[in-house]
Image (tube, rainbow, N blue to C red):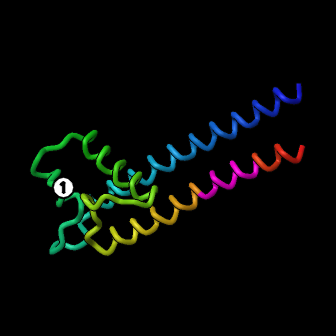
């Protein structure tokens, strides 16, 4: 009975961590999309204009997926360079996304290691 409860507890923690990552990704993707649409400085084109969403008439889904792609690659730490922050505010948001992404992955990694170590102790 105890083993089943422990497996159920581990599975619920895993599902919570996966849900947390997706919710985190969605939230910051929306923030990145809104950041690109803000017109902070008129002389500099933000990432939204550089992607030519205004001229191409992209659907909301295409714009959202582009921001999810950027946010996910920034969370993972590699970044591909096809979408880059150009304004100071975009650089600020990019830095926040980077720091929070590393923290989220660190939290999941530490949770996994702690679960592994606690299993060996019992």
Question: Which residue is at the front of the view, 67 or 31?
Answer: 67
Q: Position of residue 88 (x, y in %)?
A: 31, 75
Question: Which residue is at the front of the view, 118 or 83?
Answer: 118
Q: Residue at x 24, y 58 (%)?
A: 82
Q: Residue at x 53, y 61 (%)?
A: 102
Which stretch appears magenta? 106-115
Q: Position of residue 116 (x, y in %)?
A: 75, 46
In this rendering, position of residue 13 left or right of residue 27: right
Up-down relation of residue 23 to residue 90 (above or below): above
In this rendering, position of residue 106 left or right of residue 82: right
In this rendering, position of residue 4 left or right of residue 74: right
Q: Position of residue 14 (x, y in %)?
A: 65, 39
Q: Residue at x 13, y 44 (%)?
A: 57
Q: Residue furthest top?
A: 1
| Dominant secondary structure, magenta | helix
What is the secondary structure assignment of the residue under circle 1?
A: loop
Q: Residue at x 57, y 41 (%)?
A: 18
Mark 1, residue position: 51
């Amino acid at each position: 009975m105890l083993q089943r409860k422990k497996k159920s507890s581990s599975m619920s923690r895993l599902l919570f961590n996966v849900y947390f990552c997706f919710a985190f990704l969605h939230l910051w993707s929306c923030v990145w999309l809104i950041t690109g649409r803000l017109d902070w400085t008129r002389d500099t084109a933000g990432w939204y204009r550089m992607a030519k969403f205004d001229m191409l008439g992209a659907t909301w889904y295409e714009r959202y997926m582009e921001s999810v792609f950027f946010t996910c690659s920034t969370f993972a730490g590699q970044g591909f360079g096809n979408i880059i922050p150009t304004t100071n505010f975009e650089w600020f948001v990019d830095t926040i996304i980077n720091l929070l992404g590393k923290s989220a992955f660190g939290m999941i990694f530490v949770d996994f290691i702690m679960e592994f170590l606690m299993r060996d102790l019992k």
